[in-house]
Image (tube, grey):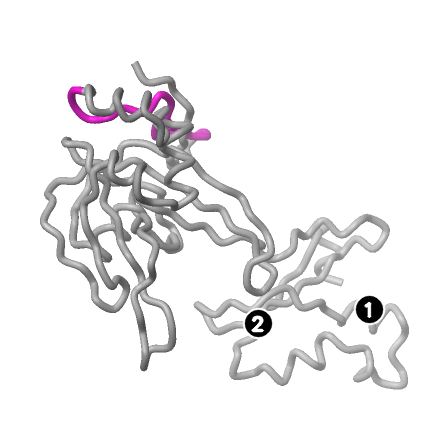
Amino acid sequence: KYWSDNDYTSAWLHVPASRAGLVEALTSEEHATDTATAADIDALTFDLHHVNATESTIVLKKWLRPSAEDKIPPFASHQVGCAGFVLSEDNELLLVREWTGPPSNRTPTKQWKLPGGLLDAGESFAEATCREVIEETGIPCRFESVLSFWHRHGLVFGKSDFYYVSLLNPVSKDIEIDPVEVSACKWMPIEQFLTSQGHPLILHILDKVFELKNNEESLESLRNKKGRLRPIVKMVEGDVQFGNRDPFPTYTGRISR
């Protein structure tokens, strides 16, 4: 009644995991008393929304406008990953090999890839990508821009995935790998990568962002290139601010000049 009298649209309950037994009573109509009306039962019945592992709570929700469509969005359906396209001044790319197999019998993966991982809560692309690179390889970097991203579906637990690749400028080239995460790490010249490697995402970026392919024209252009490669287009970081709220990083496409 309080929620209705105060014109609430929805209500939320955060049940501590230690009191998980309450969830059955709160989400089931079978526990209603004989004297309860249909309205009473409906008023006290919640729906499971999600489990908050960080706070060890089970979150229940209730839409309070039965005559209108339930507008409460489902729990987050995406994970967000990032990778560093770490390009040195002499056009070498930082690459890693991960591990495969059970912990008792791990073997290095065959394919070289970009260092990266998942964003932590509250991180920007710049913060997360630089953090992942230094954790895996020991290379501190400066963030420059977002180069590319994908959006794919059908991952574990039915989740979808955003995966962003950012251009980073290394502060040093001294590698110190995390042996738990990475089996090997090295700098590879771009020409060598084009002619010997088959990682589809990296080849896509070299083609679409740097206009480089494994053909004689591209390789000749690369050999004659002076200085560090520049992307033909990139998404640079800026800030957007609404009123007195804190500004937040916003990435906008820009043609390199």
Looking at the picture, how far across and down is residue 185, in whole percent? Answer: 21, 54
Residue drawn at the location 67% of the way across and 68% of the way down: 48
Q: Is residue 37 above or below residue 245?
A: below
Where does the N terminus fall, quadrant-wise?
bottom right
Q: How far separated are the C-alphas under marks 2 and 1?
A: 20 Å
Magenta-drawn stretch contains 238: yes
Q: Is residue 203 left or right of residue 32?
A: left
Residue drawn at the location 51% of the way across and 67% of the way down: 52
Where does the C terminus fall, quadrant-wise?
top left
Q: Quadrant of residue 75?
A: bottom right
Q: Nearer the viewer, mark 2 or mark 1?
A: 2
What's the residue type where badge 2 is placed? Ile
Is 167 or 218 nearer to us in this picture?
218
Looking at the picture, how far across and down is residue 236, in whole percent? Answer: 35, 27
For label 1, the SS is helix
Residue 247 in view (yes/no)? no
Residue drawn at the location 35% of the way across and 48% of the way down: 123
What's the residue type where badge 1 is placed? Asp
Magenta stretch bounds:
226-243
Looking at the picture, how far across and down is residue 28, in whole percent? Answer: 77, 77
Circle on res. 58: 2
Residue drawn at the location 39% of the way across and 34% of the way down: 205
Is 162 or 66 nearer to us in this picture?
162
Residue at image mark 1? 42
Q: Quadrant of residue 246?
A: top left
Q: Is residue 103 left or right of residue 151?
A: left
Q: Is residue 39 left or right of residue 45?
A: right
Numbered circles on residues, count: 2
Please tell me which of labels 2 and 1 falls first in the chain. 1
For label 2, the SS is strand
